[in-house]
Image (cartoon, rainbow, N blue to C red):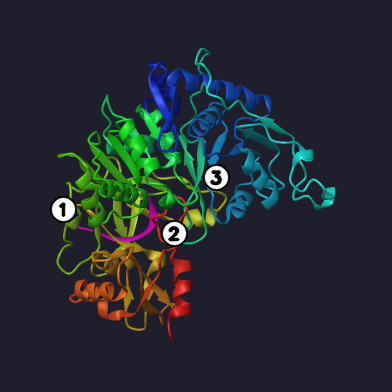
Amino acid sequence: MTAAPDSIPARLARLGERPQSTVIVRCSGPVSAEGVTAAQLLDGCRRIADALRAAGVRAGDQAVVRTRDAYQLVAGVYALTSLGAVPVPAEPRAGVRRCLDEIAPGVFVGERLTHVARRALGWGRGHVRTALVTGRAFPGPAHLPGRHLPERHLPERHLPERHLPSAVPGGTGPAPWVPEPRSEDLATIAFTPGSSGRPEGMEDAHATLAGQLTALDAVLGIRADDVLFSCFLPFAALGPLLGVPTVVPQVDHLAPARTPSGHLVGPLLRHRATVLLGSSAVLGLIAGHCARHGLTLPSVRRVLSFGAPLRPRLAEALAKALPAGAEIVSVHGATGCLPVAAIDAERSGALRIQPPPGHSGTCLGRPLPGVDARVLDADATGLGEIAVAGPVVSPGRHVRPEGTGAARAEADGTPWYRTGDLGRLDEEGRLWYLGRKAHLVTGGEFTLTTEDIEATADTAAGVRRTALVGVGPAGRQRAVLCVEPERAARTDAVVSALRTVLRDHPHARRIGTVLFHPRFPADIRHDSRIDRARLAARAAQGVPQ
């Protein structure tokens, strides 16, 4: 069977056409780094695939993959794919046990300490039959902390664990054989961040993954001499498939915004990256480091921000560190449809595009080629739920048919995916974002979208970001504006600045209380999407009854 041009087998075959080219650079701290060639990566994939097969992993097996090492992640995911297994990236998050119980994985691949956590916290208990360790070999039961406990008190009955080959090989062995899958075959399961509720597993078929890679080709605009700097570890698995050398810095994956900024800027400069990809939280670290140390990023020609809408202030800060003509692009999407739309910030000003008269929100740009978007259940102003159709859309939620049905809509004979985002389409075909449907604030006489207020409030001097939340039962909520100030900003000065920018806002008078928080709770994946449920709970404690 001939591989489709955008399929994983076809892309891996193209990877092997330049065996000595560097495809991954994994960094440790601000200086240390190791390059991995295409030949080494493919050789490592084959070796890992052989070890997986010997351990009993078969086509169709769902395999959790949890490792912080870029090479081990990429080689492990490709090896599982070559066997027809289904890799399930597992991120550090609250509720990971519930997520794994839902998908019931039979295989668990992870670092030594991850297996300690798996045992102690019961991840995959009753489902995992094959445990595979990356990195150094896992200690036997006699070496486990708590070995003095009787067997009945151990957190989990001991599973035989095998050690996968983790060292980068010499690259002299053959590449793995990767059969061409059917387009409808399940390729991976990815969990949503859970910032709007319970995390959900989204199924990606091979056709979906091929569509997403094609769309990412368009967004990244990769050239022959480009070097991608990816501040999001899971994206490292896509970089080689996109045909671009990918530098992976040492990001704190438990709290990306707390990564030492030198761990980002040092490798970025050293490897002369041309395309920079990261969440707004991480890009803020890079912009701040450059400003404090008087540095510029002369090799960077394109920056892509994702995870949350890119604010003009951050775009302006990034622009000061970039060479003339560099592009700053805000990319919008979701776990179930990525990417959807993109907008070029045109250095420092275009993100200030004004909405049509009488409207509000943040412009997301036009849908990408091959992606269709429309607004469902729109009101008289055109505000409704953004729905997406096209090859980037996941077929459905894993083992939640009721959730899949609720997120689907039929229109004009086309199945549309409801994103849960509120927005409008303007006359030029651009999408405008108003926030999440689940985050509407509803009072007795008003309904407020979060982005309507926050896009304006975030421009106030001394404000890092704001979050509008509702306190009380739906329909009788009190609108509370939570403020995360910049460091050293005076509270009275910030309040005055907020009054100034919101003075002419038509809905600002609905804000009943302003509360300050030193740091908002946010999703672990990007550290950019605000955990509004937790913030609302905190706000409820500070709002007078």
Image spot of residue 497 (x, y percent): 23, 72
- Earlier in the chain: of badge 2 and badge 1, it is 1
Q: Position of residue 12 (x, y in %)?
A: 43, 23
Quarter of the image that includes the C terminus = bottom left
Q: Disc 1 marks which amino acid?
A: Gly
99 over 459 or under it: above or below: above
Name the mark on residue 522: 2
Q: Residue at x 69, y 44 (%)?
A: 127
Disc 2 versus disc 3: nearer the observer? 2
Q: Is residue 308 visible?
A: yes
**Residue under numbered circle 3:** 90
User: Going by the picture, which residue comes out furthest to the top?
Assistant: 172
Q: Secondary structure at mark 3?
A: loop
Numbered disc 1: secondary structure: loop
Name the spot of residue 232 as percent of width and height, x first. Answer: 41, 42
At 26% from the left edge and 68% from the top edge, which residue is drawn?
Answer: 457
Picture quadrant where residue 195 is located: bottom left
Image quadrant assignment for residue 542: bottom left
Answer above or below: position of 362 versus 495.
Answer: above
Magenta stretch bounds: 414-426
Find disc 1 in the rendering and name its residue.
Answer: 349
Residue placed most toward the observer, 372 or 288: 288
Q: Residue at x 65, y 49 (%)?
A: 123
The kind of residue tagged 3 is: Ala
Magenta span includes 467: no
